Amino acid sequence: MVKLSAVLASLLLVVGCSSAPYKTQYTLSPEIGSSIPTSVKQKPYSIIVSDVKSFGAGKNTDMTYSREANVVEAYTKSAWVEPPVQLVKAALANALIASNAYQDVLMSPTPINSPYKVDATIQKMQQQFNNGQSNIELSLMVRLVNTSNHKLVFSKIYAATEPVMALNAQGGVEAYNKALDRLLPNIVQDIIRR
């Protein structure tokens, strides 16, 4: 009887897992390249990109949208390949690498010390539908911190709103990538000029 119960339990587990709906996975992949300002002279030190934080959206792989005020819903057939906090962290690091402004660009956690670190927070990341149209809002607070004296060098909020061409998750992803394409050059320029 115990063996039969174990077999039935494992069958239920297999059937339950196989019936879960497949989700199309998306990533943030801004076109980092010619739009990123490049430094003529490389700084003789590294910079660290800290773990990105979030005020809400972006901590997990759920892709969300809103059709009415104060109501957030999740796509059932779409997901981020990784939480957006990780995707934004990688995009920031890649943009800083493309700038060639630093000897090295590191991502935390790392045992290597650096005189500066970039802290970022996703303040808003939302796709909204309204009257048959859609747009996304992306807002990032970026701070540059001097790790030697623990002083804030600068703090600025970067925000973009982009229209969504296809009224679905993929359209939202394309708009988020356009928003990051617009924001990253300004973020990098503000960081490297300090």
Image: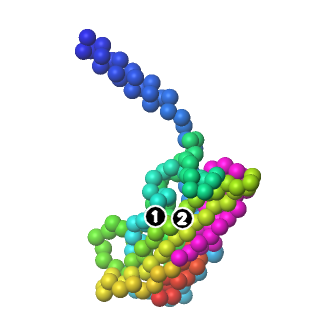
Please say if 169 is above or below 76: below
How many residues crowd around disc 2 within 10 Å: few (fewer than 14), some, or many (20 or more)?
A: some
Q: Which residue is mark 2?
A: 124
Please say if 91 is above or below 21: below
Disc 1, SS: loop
Q: Residue furthest front?
A: 69
Per the image, is 134 magenta? no
Residue 173 shows up from this direction: no
Q: Amino acid at mark 1?
A: Phe
Tell me which corner region of the image, top left, top right, bottom left or bottom right, holds residue 114: bottom left
Picture disc at residue 55: 1
Q: Which residues are magenta?
A: 157-183
Front residue of 153/54: it is 54
Give the percent coordinates (x, y) of residue 81. 50, 50
Q: CA distance from mark 1 to mark 2?
A: 7 Å
In the image, what residue occupies the spot 63% across and 75% down?
Answer: 35
In the drawing, does residue 101 fall left or right of residue 161? left
Per the image, is 161 magenta? yes
How many residues crowd around disc 1 within 10 Å: few (fewer than 14), some, or many (20 or more)?
A: few
Give the percent coordinates (x, y) of residue 105. 43, 74
Residue 111 shows up from this direction: yes
Query: Given contact means CB atoms under 8 Å apart, are the residues at marks 1 and 2 in contact?
Result: yes
In the image, what residue occupies the spot 56% across and 56% down?
Answer: 70
Q: Amino acid at mark 2?
A: Lys
In the image, what residue occupies the spot 70% across and 51% down?
Answer: 167
Disc 2, SS: strand
In the drawing, does residue 10 fall left or right of residue 162? left
Front residue of 183/98: it is 183
Give the percent coordinates (x, y) of residue 181. 62, 69
